[in-house]
Amino acid sequence: MFNSIRGIITGKSADTVYLLTGGIEWDITVPAKDIERLPSPGEEGKVYTWLYHKEDQMRLYGFADEAGRNTFLELIKVEGIGPRGGIKIMGGIGREELEQALETEDLARLEQVPGLGKKTAQKMLLALKGKLTRIPQPGSAGPYSDLVKALEDMGYDRRSAAAALEKAAASADPGLSRSEKEQVVFREAILSLGGQ
């Protein structure tokens, strides 16, 4: 499947971006907040995509960055939120504000999002708390993002994994090579997360 589409933006509407590439004009459903971040019509742009396919329809959804797409993919795992609902939610609240509301359990803020009732907001809190917290990327404050991802793939909560790695890194022998340090930090983080 394709990860992103780059081309000339030929038009924008409330929830759609039209992107021309190789003689094909794509009709991509995009959250309103992402539409604002994409270049103006006539300029080149890149849209990160996700294809929704059912027996009776196909729809291409797009996002200004990978983080937005990842948030959307987590949102649509919540019972009662489909792709259209996920786009509407992300169009009504910025990704960072959504993450903040989930982490602080700010139900009142979530209920203010258009189309999001109290029941669905509560389901979101239960399902997504701790899963959308952004981890620093390599080269910034967090050199262990690959290890965070590995722990997350093993079923650990992203925030807990990041905290365990940070704690293990602080107590690791500074004389170790980078590779050795990563192995030690990873092992210690697993032990910590496992309660040993």
Image (cartoon, rainbow, N blue to C red):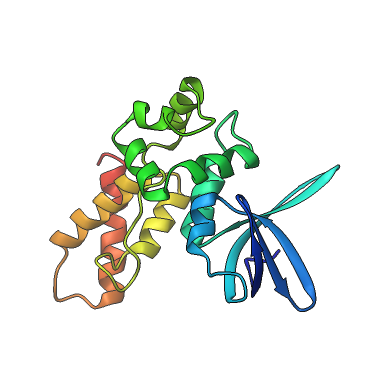
Left or right of residue 105, residue 15 in this image: right
Position of the C terminus by quadrant = top left
User: Which residue is pictured at 74% across the width and 51% down the height?
Assistant: 59
Residue 161 is situated, as x and y percent measured from the top left of the image, at 32, 50
Query: Does 141 sit above or below residue 188?
Result: below
Left or right of residue 152, residue 13 in this image: right
Task: Pick whichever, 136 or 11, lies toward us.
Answer: 11
Task: Pick whichever, 81 or 140, lies toward us.
Answer: 81
Query: Does 162 sit above or below residue 43?
Result: above
User: Which residue is pictured at 24% across the width and 78% down the height?
Assistant: 177
Query: Does 46 sit above or below residue 148?
Result: below
Q: Would residue 76 be visible to someone looking at this image? A: no
User: Which residue is pictured at 30% across the width and 57% down the height?
Assistant: 187
Residue 172 is situated, as x and y percent measured from the top left of the image, at 17, 64
Left or right of residue 87, residue 183 in this image: left
The image quadrant of residue 11 is bottom right
Position of the N terminus by quadrant = bottom right
Left or right of residue 98, residue 25 in this image: right
Residue 8 is situated, as x and y percent measured from the top left of the image, at 65, 75
Task: Pick whichever, 10 or 66, lies toward us.
Answer: 10
Q: Which residue occupies the extreme top position in the image? A: 119
User: Which residue is pictured at 58% across the width and 76% down the height?
Assistant: 43
Q: Would residue 164 be visible to someone looking at this image? A: yes
